[in-house]
Structure formats: C-alpha cells, structure tokens
Amino acid sequence: MTDSTPAIRRNGLLQSCEPCRKSKLKCDHGRPVCGRCIAKNITQRCFYHPAPMTKDASQPPSYRPAKRPRTESSLTPSPEPTSASGTASASASASTVQYGLRLAAADQRPSTTPGYLGSTSFSAVFSEHRANISFEEGNHAPDGVLSKLTDGYRLESGLEVIKFLYRNNIWEILIRKFYAGHLMAVVSNLIIRAIIISLRRIFDAIDREKDVEKQLRDLVQRIFQSSAHPLTSHASMTVEEYFASFTDENLRWEVVGLVLATAGIAMMSTSDDDPDVLRVAPDAQGAEMLRSRLVEASRTCLLFCATAASVNELLGFYQYNDMLLRTQYYGDTSTPCSHDTNIATNDSIGYAAWRKLGNLTATIYAAGLHQESTRAQNCPPFLHQWRKMCFAAAFYADKSLSTFVGRPPFINYRYCSISPPLDIKDEDLIAGEEQLRRAMANLDSSGWNTKGNTLRGSLLRLRFHLAVLREQALEIALGNYDDKTILSKYNELIQTAQNQWQSCPVYLRHDQYIPNGESPNITFARRHIYLDYLYTLFLVQRMVVKRTNTSQEALFMTSREVLAIILEVTGERHPGVDMSRHHSWIVLYYGLPSASTLAFELLRQTQEPGPHPVMPPRPEIIRNLSVFVSCLSWVATPGQGNYRTCKAVEKKLSDILDQILDPKPDPQPVQGFLDASGGYPDHDAAGLYSLLNWYAPNNIDLDSFESPAKDEFLF
C-alpha cells in the first residue's frame, strides 16, 4: 500500500517527486501522484525515491519512459526485430525519452589524462628532463573508466543515437549541401567526408537477414571502447593514418557527435520545403522534430565524450559545432530548463551559450591548442594547420559572444603563442611535402595566397586577425581605465585596425573588391567579415564618445556604413535556403546599435537648436532608417527567438522616426543617448538604448522587450 504521508527531507522541506526534482519544478507533493505530473499526463513516471541522491547504475528506476506519440513521417520507422537479449537490455534502460532519443546519464567522470601541462604545472620539472630519465606516459584508460562508459544506461542511449543514423540518410544529405554552400565551415570537408564514408561503410556491412539490433549494439560497444583511449599522432603520420585513427573500427563518439551537430546546423538553415527534407518530414511539424532529434542526439554524444579519456582537436571541433547548433535551436536568451517540458527562461542572458563556450575553452587549453610548439613536433603539417583552425574558430567565437553579453573573454591571447592558420587549400596540406612547399611559395610576406583565391583558410585566417583586434577593443570597453588612458588606447587601436585592414588582400575586402559572378556564399562571407571589422571600430568609438565627448564624427560615419551594409544583406535572397536566422541576428547585433545611434542623433538635432558640431546627412539617414524599420517587420518569423525583439524594436524606432519627421511642439528632451551639452551620459535611461548598453548587461530593460536571442551567431 502506498504511503500517503509526505516525506520530510533533512532540511525540513517536503520531498518532491522524481520528475519534478529532476526538472527543478515546484512539486505540490501529492500522493501517490502529484498534481503537476497529472497535468502533464506522466503519472506513470511520478514516484518518490527513498534516497534520490543515490543510484545503482545496474538497477532500473521504478518508472518507465514516457511513450512518444507515433507520426506518419518516415522519421519514425518501424523498429527492427529485437532479440531476447536486446529486450532484456532495453528494459534495463534508465534513460528518459526525448524526441525519440534516450538522454545520457548525468553521472559523469572527468577525463583520465591531464592533457596539456604548462611550465608551472606539477610535472614541469620532469618534462624538462625527458632526455635524462625514462618514464611511461599513460595512454590508456585506467581501470573502471571503460565499465563506467559501457554500463547499460549509456549503451541504450548510444544505441538510440546509432539507430537514428542507421535508419535514414538525411543527415548525410544535409551535410553535403551545407559544405557545398558554406565557405566558412570550421571543420575541413576532408575530415567530414572521411567520417561519412566510414559510417556508410559500417552501416552497409550490417546484415539485415540477422539480428540488426544486436549488430548495432555491438557497434555501440566498440565505439565506447575506442572513445576510452586518447588519440595519438606522430610527425610522419599520413592523412590516411589520421583518418583511420577515428573511423571504421576506431569510430569514436567525438566524430559521431560531430556529424550530428553539423547536420543540425545545416538543418537550421534549410527550408522546410526542401525536397530532401520533405521526403522524411512532409510538414513543418516533422521538420521541427528532425531538428530537435539532431540537437538531442548531439547532446547525448557530448555527454559520452565528457566521460571519455582524452581531449583532442576533434572534440574541440565538435564542441564548437554543438555550441552553434544549440544556440541556433534554443536562442541565446532561452536556456532549456527541462527536457521534459522544454521550458525556457530569460533570467540568465546568454548563459547556455556562455557555458558551452567555457567547455570549449577548457578543451582548447587542455589539448594545448593555444600553444604553437606544444604538439607541432608530434604531428604532421596538415594536422598542425587543422588544430590552428580549431583554435582560431574558438578564439573568434569567444570574442563574438563576449561582445554580445558584455563579459570578459575566456581566452586571453596574452597566454597564447599560436599563429593564424595558413592561407592554403586543404588539398595542398595533405598532398605531401613537395606540394605543400609549392603552395607555401605562393604566399606573400604577410601569409596570404597570391592567386586571389578566396579559400576557407583565407577567411579563418582573417577572422583570427580581427578577433585579436576585438580582444583589444573589449579591453578598452570592459576594462578599468581613466579617460586619458582610454583615449590613448583608442587612438592606438584605431591605427592598428586600419593598418591591419589595409594589409588584407583586395579579394577579401568588401570595401575594395568588385564581385564578378562569384557565388553568393563568398559575397556573404566577405560582407560579414567587413561588418566585424566595422563593429570593432564602432565599439571603441562609442566608448570614447561616451567617456571623452570626442570622435562623434567617426562614430556617425561608421554607423552609416554599417547600416548601409545591413540593408544590402537583408535585400538578398537565396533560393532553397532559409536565411531568416542569419538575417535577424545580423540586423539586431550589428544594425540595431548603429541605427539607434543615428536615430537618436537626428532626434536630438530636431529637438534642439543648432548649430551642431556634427551634421550627418539627414535625407540619407532617414531613408535608410525607414528601410531598416521595414526590415524589422519581416526579418524574423513567428516562433524564432528574435521575433518578439524585432517587433518591439520596430515599434520604438518607428516612434522615433515619427518624431523626427513630424516634430511636436514643446518636445521632451532626448533621454538615453546625448545630454544637453551634446555629450554622452555615463548612465543610459531605460528603454531602447538600455538594450544597446552592451557593456552593462545588468541594465538591460527586459520589461520593455526581450533581449536579442542568438538564433545564429555567425562564428
């Protein structure tokens, strides 16, 4: 008989049922089933654990996973025949079902290898005397790690992931399309292609006349075994040997997850009416289910990697792509609190993405990817360059997200000795020493290719240089400097940035290059990089204007140029590609601060008698602001994280334009941007401009409208 008396915890509070406790939701403590579980129709899962903080991994919980409703989509094919052993093992699963995928266990074990250890580490003295002593470094998982990785809980979760990949090939189609139209992909197409070929070879070897589930279960077991051992490399390693170290019999969760995360990113920018998507998801609901499955499958693999034995560049690539995927799916201000209810809150701006970035940074440092010589002597040239690209991507993402949330960056370049990646094709990197030497001979003294080819390495290299400048801009914006020091650092940074940009090849500069029938993805990438450069100038110019009341003309010129480019971007259309997430993010991240800067200045000049020290061209600005406001009305679609923000900002900017075009008698003085003397106050008023106060995120007025969701950080 079930006890109807509520249990009391040690702290004197009533005990919550397991679903409410794990979801961190308020439980009404009803017995035998609480009211929340009744309302959510999960009564079969509601129970009160006698010792909720203890768990025997070998024992199943006293509830069963909630059944997922069947759909007509081919995303939910009939299950394969299950053997007796498979049934028994499946019944032992303790995982929860979400979007058809069992989630991995929260019980994790840290990496068993120390990774990169610097000159102050406990082993530094031994490392400096390697030539004088001999000792064996551990390169295998210690006792207990493999058993932790391969318990029934994780085996069942891993089996769900592999089944998802095995039963349809939409992930492969999405990835191929993504690489065909995406120039700034961080992971080399050669790596992705090797993984896809390996997975296809493995799945084709499955004998459908025999027990398919048992064969897939054996595959999962092998993946866990491979993942328990660190990757190794040596200077003479060929690219075939490198690929073989994580494919086929050596398949690892890092690469399985990398495929899922990349497919998820591709799906986020793929239209629901794409023919290949319609084949497996005939309606919008099915397409959204596919997105959610890719997100959850990637999450599951990432949890497996957190329990494995090593850190490496593949894990760094994977964490980078998973961060992009999850921020595109959930939005930057939407932190999923519960996988059962999919609740999202705004009480921690950017925390989900921020936490993911912290994990990526930990991998970068632990793998030694921030040091030029740490692994260069132990890996071939192609791998050394790919590791540089991994660091460059993480470094750029760090500066972008730090700018967005107004927080100090994770990665400080003062502690890094890595140089930017070479401006060379991947095919030249793997073709051998002679071909690599010829390719390097075609580089100029600054490291750029002289053939005028816009390569993946070209863009990653340029973004790396711009990220270094952005770090210096953040130091000015977020640092504790007096006005004199800020002005000195500002002048130095502006000069450095302009010199850096002038030294870039013409074919990479949006302000110099004249397109001649090039693909839209190259134009988009070049334009976005130029926006990054301009926005770095904008950040420091705005700070100097606020603090010293100087350089207003430079700020307005930069704002005008940014706004003009934003209108170019939003005016383009790409058939079969859903660019709404890209465009809404660009409009809010780059366009809104610049547009509001110009709008408030025009409003101030309308309400206050002149003369004014700076007179921006009024007709041009009004025309562009009107088009910008129009863009806000359609750039985001209902359901996307930025939709409500765009609507709210559209209304506020429309009101400002109305005041500029039809000024009322006895106007109220402009607040929140310029003070009566034409200077910039230290504290912005609440409202639109508080949203733009990127340096003080705590002042953001979330009651006025939501902060921009990071639907698509273009890392």
Image (tube, rainbow, N blue to C red):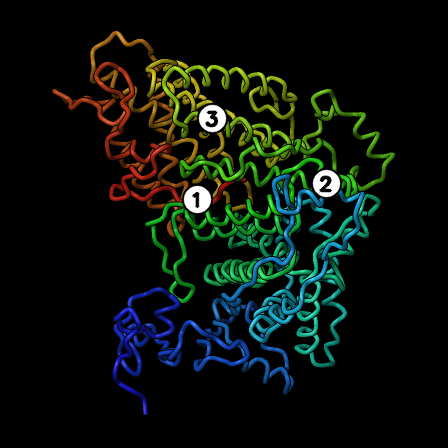
Say few, some or many: other residues with alpha carbon within 10 Å of mark 1 (under 14 / 14 to 19 / 20 or more): many
* Side (left or right) of 352 relative to 451: left
User: Is 76 situated left or right of 596 in this image?
Assistant: right
The amino acid pointed to by label 2 is: Glu
Which residue shows up at 37% across the image and 32% down it? 695
User: Could you give the CA–CA distance between mark 2 and mark 3, rounded to whole angstroms?
Assistant: 37 Å
- Give the CA distance from mark 1 to mark 3: 21 Å
Camera-near label (2 vs 3) is 2
Which element carries disc 3, helix, strand or loop? helix
Pair 1/2: label in front: 2
**Count of numbered circles in the view:** 3
Figure quadrant of the C terminus: top right
Residue occupied by mark 2: 128
CB atoms of marks 2 and 3 within 8 Å:
no
Q: Report the residue at 60% width, 57% height from top.
A: 111
Q: Give the mark nearer the N terminus: 2 vs 3.
A: 2
Q: Where is residue 6 in the image (x, y as percent from the top left)?
A: 26, 79
Visible residue check, residue 430 = yes
Q: Name the residue under label 1.
A: 710
Q: Position of residue 151 (x, y in %)?
A: 60, 74
Q: Is residue 278 visible?
A: no
Q: What element carries label 2?
A: helix
In the rendered image, which quarter is residue 585 located in? top left
Q: Residue at x 42, y 37 (%)?
A: 407
The answer to the question of whether label 1 and label 3 lie on touching residues, with beta carbons closer than 8 A, is: no
**Residue 706: horizontal and vertical position, in percent?**
32, 44
Mark on residue 473? 3
Q: Earlier in the sequence, mark 1 or mark 2?
A: 2
